[in-house]
Amino acid sequence: MLSLTQLEKRYPNGTLALSGLTLGIEAGEIVAIVGGSGCGKSTLLRLIAGLDQPSRGRITLAGSAIRDPHPDIGVVFQEPRLMPWLTIAANVGFGIRHLPEAERKRRVSEALDRVGLADRGGHWPRELSGGQAQRVALARALVRQPKVLLLDEPFSALDALTRTDLQDHLLALWAYDRPTLILVTHDIEEALVLADRVVVMQPNPGRVRLDLPVPLARPRNRLDGEVLAWKTRLLAELGHASRPLSNDEVFPAVAI
Amino acid sequence: MGGALTTASLASVVPAERGPHRGNGGILLGLILPLGLALGWEILVDLGWADGRLLPTPSTIVATLSDLARNGDLGSHVLATLQRVALGFLFGVTAGTLLGAISGYWTLARRLLDPTLQALRNIPSIAWVPLFILWFGIFETSKVILIAVGVFFPIYLSLGAAILGVDRKLVEVGRVLRFSDREMITRILLPATLPSYIVALRSGLGLGWMFVVAAEFMGAEQGLGFLLVDGQQTGRPAVILASIVAFALLGKVTDSLLATLSARFLRWQDSFKPAE
């Protein structure tokens, strides 16, 4: 459904952030994109979001090319990015102002209910914890009922407990409409708990190193033996990915 | 900007919800010096140790004010001045907001407009007076325009700068939500710049009060500025001081009004709260 063809992104300063990246993503798929810093994973997400344009190649969603933000593509950023001057409810309804008031209210309260913040609609963003604010950001993206939801390290700024809580929560939210989820993360465990497929990227220039289906049953337990085995394997792959081009296989060690 | 600073005191920038903590102690403390000086002068003149002819005592000023109020002069002077400030403020704010928003948002407009406006800003606004009189006549139009020019610049400058300082991350949210240029301005940029915009409105208002005096100096038959000139020409310092007191009160009242009206739009702020 979403297809990326021979994407290249060169920034004005000459940095080649992505090169020759080709990837097809099916509807309803949950894809995790992992890789060390500088491998172009955030750049990739910005291109799909339409916030930046590729220097070469093309991105299509259900056949139509994407060069600007698309109504069917939602984004959750690393920070909640709530408008501090709007109440929580108004923040959630921020992107659906074009809908009739009754419909808007219904969707906002439904979204707030789903993220477990039904009673916080009238509060200010400053009154929320980091995890709650990120849930509002999720609600703001989901209330538009996107076909594709992009998440750029959405839980990386949260503490470990809140993070696992929100990962489970994301899966529950996904189950309602089953949008395509593309999740950029540097957390292997997060990728394994959430994704149907893990795409490992490598830097200089950013490209796909490994495209790996994760055939684990759901719900996945973080301490399950199989999950742990996958984790070890992926960490080894990332060890390669973050190293400059070389074929030596001597130290397949942890490196993030 | 001196006029702006005298009316926009720091204490009134602190949002009203913290008021109760301040208590009356702070206000009383601030009253000691002016009341002490006034009382001292009153006593000195009363005892005959000083001559109150050039600097009339507070009681004389109050008496002059109440005389002016009783025969209806004060009311019509205040009304004339208020009307000029209100009109000038309205026009200045409108133009400053429009041009500030445009030049903050569109780089092309900024490159086109900003150099000229910055150059014009460096002309002391009073220098326009002779030209404005030639162009718009001696009556109301030239006065209102002069005030509007004074109000315009702080608004234009702060809004333009504040828009350029808005967090890129919030703007990106608007881009993802496919906001039009108009929505981007009205729904993200203006609200985000509201705190500095309100400070700009208050400095603009302060300058408006400053410029109305200049405007009324250039030939008016009514207004507090006229009263100043009249007091000087007829050798009545009490009248001058009475109109200065009226200016101070009006400036303070309108500024407090603006601050109070705006406070409810800034409730969302998560800002530094100074300790008592």
Image (cartoon, helix red, strand yellow):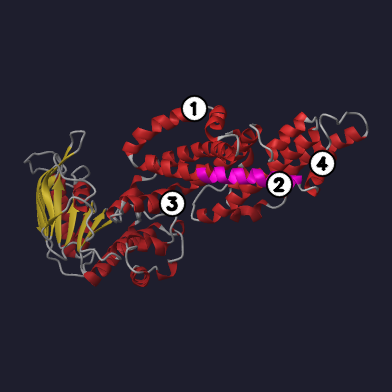
- The tag on residue B191 is 3
Q: Mark 2, mark 4: which one is toward the viewer?
A: 2
Give the Cα distance between marks 2 and 1: 35 Å
- Amino acid type, label 1: Asn
- Amino acid type, label 3: Pro
Circle 1 SS class: loop
Q: Mark 2, mark 1: which one is toward the viewer?
A: 2
Q: Residue at x 12, y 55 (%)?
A: A60
**Residue B85 is one of the magenta-drawn residues:** yes
Q: Mark 3 or 1 closer to N-term?
A: 1
Q: Nearer the viewer, residue B224 or A70?
A: B224
- Decide: marks 2, 4 in contact (CB < 8 A)? no
How crowded pointer 3 is (Cα within 10 Å; few <14, some 14-19, many 20+) is rated as some
- Looking at the rendered structure, whether the residues under marks 2 and 3 are on a common chain is answered as yes
| Magenta part of the chain | B73-91
Give the Cα distance between marks 4 and 1: 39 Å
Q: Mark 4, mark 1: which one is toward the viewer?
A: 4
Against B213, is A207 above or below? Answer: below
- The tag on residue A87 is none
- The tag on residue B76 is 2
Give the Cα distance between marks 4 and 3: 46 Å
Q: Mark 2 or 4 closer to N-term?
A: 4
Tell me if I can see residue B85 in this picture.
yes
Dot 1: chain letter: B
- Decide: marks 4, 1 in contact (CB < 8 A)? no
Residue pointed to by mark 4? B64
Against B247, is B130 above or below? Answer: above
Q: Mark 2 or 3 closer to N-term?
A: 2
How crowded pointer 1 is (Cα within 10 Å; few <14, some 14-19, many 20+) is rated as few
